[in-house]
Image (cartoon, rainbow, N blue to C red):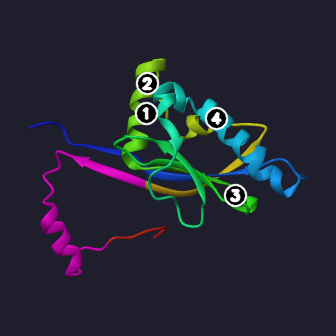
Amino acid sequence: MKDAKIEVGVDQFTLVLQTTKVKFDFDAWRDEIAEAMLSDFMKNSKMLDLFSELDFCKADTKLPEGYTLGYAFKNSSFYFVTAYHEAFQKMGIIVKFSSYAWQEYQKRFELTYGYPIHLHSFFQLIESNLYDFRLSRIDPCVDFFNYGIDIAALKRSIEQKRTEVRYGKY
């Protein structure tokens, strides 16, 4: 039997980029600032190097709630989208990585640059003078390999309150 192991990682996450520019005209957000921030993020993150630059275009997928203009990679098998609201700059630019998009990004990054990338090193990579960013959502994952866990039995045990799932400090 193979060795039992546990892998902890990041499933999906969402970032929000906020402009560092303090004063600007209302139309400047839509006409220059948002697009400059987005361009800087895509360059810093190396997304256009790892995925086809020609495939990055206006999104034909559903945008996050409340956002009016978005971009994604066409014909991709994963959900990666950047979007902003054209009139409400306080919403910032949202960047959503699905689990598969993040896995594919990590795989391609390591193949291209020869070393792995994790969330903390990704944050260092995307730093910019044009924007600040915050993590607005993160879904961690814990994978148990070769533990002989019967998922159906575990589910029943939780439902019947024989097994307790805890969150936080106890």
Cβ–Cβ below 8 Å for labels 1 and 4? Answer: no
**Place of residue 121 in the rendered image (x, y in percent of width and height, measured from the top left):** 57, 34
Q: Name the one closer to the observer, 12 or 88.
A: 88
* Of pointers 2 and 3, the one earlier in the residue sequence: 3
Amino acid type of the residue tagged 3 in the rendering? Glu
- Image point 73% across, 39% down: which residue? 36
Indicate the amino acid at tag 2. Answer: Glu
Name the residue tied to disc 2.
110
Q: Give the x, y percent position of residue 162.
A: 21, 78
Q: Closer to the camera, 103 or 64?
A: 64
For the residues labelled 2 and 1, the Cα–Cα distance comes to: 6 Å
Disc 2 and disc 1 in contact, CB within 8 angstroms: yes
Alpha-carbon span between mark 3 and mark 1: 31 Å
User: What is the x, y in percent for residue 54?
Assistant: 50, 29
Instruction: Identify the residue position indicated by label 4 in the image.
Output: 124
Query: On screen, 156 above or below 116?
Result: below
Q: Which residues are magenta?
A: 140-164
Quickly name the residue at label 1: 106
> What is the C-alpha distance between the residues marked 1 and 4?
15 Å
Which is nearer the N-term, disc 3 or disc 1? Answer: 3
